[in-house]
Amino acid sequence: MIRAKSFKYVLLAWFMILITSLACSINFGDDLDNDVSAEQTLVAIQLTQAALESQSPEEPEEEPVEPEEVPDVNYEGISFSFDGAITANIIPTTIPGQNMGEESMPGETYPTHFEFSFINYAIQDHFHTPRIIVYPVDEYRAISPYASDIIDSLLQALSDHPGGGDMSQLPFLPMWNAAQVFSAKVEYFDFQNGAGLRYLTMYGQALYPVDNQNLFYTYQGITYDGRYYISALLPVTHMALPHDGGSEVEDWDDFFENWESYINDTIFWLDEQEPSAFTPNLILLDNMMSSFHIDR
């Protein structure tokens, strides 16, 4: 377009020079010369006009269109993306529901839901299997009063924003026959059409040192319309933590006696660590969870 515009100016300049030179050569005393000069000038004008008309009109430059991002996972109206540093691939599955009745353990009753399993997750040797679960809220409430209470506790937490601590009771699904030993690095953030909180925690049936075999990241969230509950259970490690904390305890009685001091110091230490100090990086896990969109 710049060349076309410059060419027009060159033609115009050439035309002006031609007119001037022809005018200077006219002899007003000679009618024949005047006629020849006039004819030459007319031809020059016609040639210049034809050249200008042959140039295509300039078109405004179009702004580049950003390509629409395609989620890495899209299953049954549930979509999200993940970083390759977290996992190589994710496999979605529909898990049939089961209602084992009031006499069973709370975790044995659940509705049909969706589970996302991780292939070649960043951590291989861990007590927990990495997964993300999406539950339908109304169906879960209808068959489990225990789950209904946990869903209500999440809604309350999203309003009050409680922090972590020892023997904390932050909302968590699925239900296990174990207690939440502590919670640390508690943060609240939204996903594409919902809200939730993430934290690091351990579950156990007894007091146990914080280690890389049991520590995990969880995100507990709910869609804005209250129809779906998201639960992420993702192992994390830190190079400064022992792999198996129990193997480093020499005196269990002394450990239990000093538990409160130990766990509070450990929670403070965990809260002070940079997200990048963990494997996987907590920021990458946060980004994955914030990319969730449930359209069902």
Image (cartoon, grey):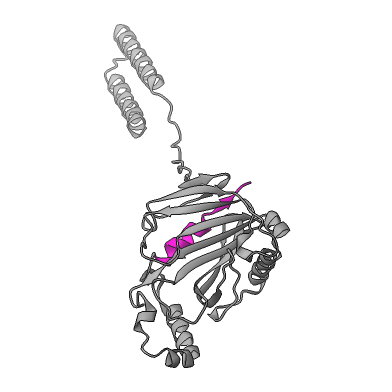
Question: Magenta includes 171?
Answer: no
Q: Position of residue 80 (x, y in %)?
A: 50, 51
State left or right for residue 132 relative to residue 16. right
Q: Is residue 245 above or below residue 82?
A: below
Residue sitting farthest toward the front: 103
State left or right for residue 287 relative to residue 33. right
Quadrant of res 53: top left
Q: Which residue lies at the image location 43% right of the left edge and 27% below the top edge?
A: 57
Q: Is residue 143 above or below residue 278?
A: above
Q: Is residue 176 above or below residue 164?
A: above
Question: Magenta includes 292?
Answer: yes
Q: Nearer the viewer, residue 89 or 222?
A: 89
Magenta range: 281-296
Q: Position of residue 85 (x, y in %)?
A: 36, 58
Q: Is residue 187 above or below residue 119?
A: below
Q: Which residue lies at the image location 71% right of the left edge and 55% below the top edge?
A: 138
Q: Nearer the viewer, residue 47 or 133?
A: 133
Q: Position of residue 115 (x, y in %)?
A: 53, 53
Q: Nearer the viewer, residue 130 or 49?
A: 130
Q: Is residue 225 visible?
A: no
Q: Which residue lies at the image location 34% right of the left edge and 8% below the top edge?
A: 35
Residue sitting farthest toward the right: 142
State left or right for residue 169 relative to residue 185. right
Count numbered badges in the picture: 0
Quadrant of res 32: top left
